[in-house]
Image (cartoon, rainbow, N blue to C red):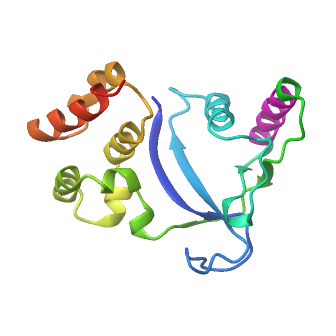
Amino acid sequence: MSGVVRTRVGYAGGKKPSPTYHDLGDHTETLQIDYDPGVVSYSELLELFWDSHNPEHSAWSRQYMAAVFYHNQEQKDAIDRSLARIASEIKAKIKTQVLPYSGFTRAEDYHQKYTLRQSQALMKEFQRMYPSSERFVDSTAAARINGYLAGHGGCERLKTEIDDLGLSPEGTKRILKVVCGRR
């Protein structure tokens, strides 16, 4: 999505200090998004959120609970408005939780940019560009490529930004083949 600057997966919503994948406590797996509000609005991100999961679904554990976290009253109000609209459309009980942000713990490296990590050739390029794991995870280019590989964004959009992502000619050809070869 245009305007998304970086993404990180991690854990939020609980009280247990320093959660990990194997010791989550009362936290939920979540996605943290940094975005440019001059390009994409919080309301647009909420639309993507509601379109990306079934708000009627009850998770079988807190680890996989659907939740949206707000940082301030303005975000809470936007969530409440979008939630009311969704509830009127589906006419069912919404199980997605709306929670105040109380902190975020970054997940272990092997969870970050999971889809991108499945491509050894592209990962080699990113490891050259971003030798530290933290810089890789915080990279806008890694977030964008991971999103495209996961099926978000199409061929035409990718072509408009591919030259800005820092890939080699071979890497460019590889990602275009994957994304533009989908039907």
Rendered position, 57 above or below 64? above
Q: How far across and down, in percent of the image, does residue 67 sit?
A: 73, 51
Q: Residue at x 71, y 51 (%)?
A: 66
Rendered position, 91 above or below 29? above
Is 149 magenta? The answer is no
> Magenta stretch?
74-87
Q: Residue at x 35, y 41 (%)?
A: 149
Is 79 magenta? The answer is yes
Choose top left, top right, bottom left or bottom right for residue 145. top left
Of 175 and 137, nearer the camera is 175
Count of marks placed on residues: 0
In this view of the protein, can residue 70 be seen by the observer?
no
Q: How far across and down, in percent of the image, does residue 75 sit?
A: 74, 40
Q: From the viewer's perspective, tell me whether residue 27 is left or right of residue 105.
A: right
Q: Residue at x 28, y 25 (%)?
A: 180
Rendered position, 27 above or below 117? below
Query: In the orientation shown, which residue stands out farthest toward the front?
Result: 183
Q: Residue at x 45, y 34 (%)?
A: 152
Q: How far across and down, in percent of the image, does residue 101 sit?
A: 72, 57
Of 126 and 111, nearer the camera is 111
Q: Look at the magenta stretch and give its main secondary structure.
A: helix
Q: How far across and down, in percent of the image, does residue 106 sit?
A: 51, 66
Rendered position, 42 above or below 34? above
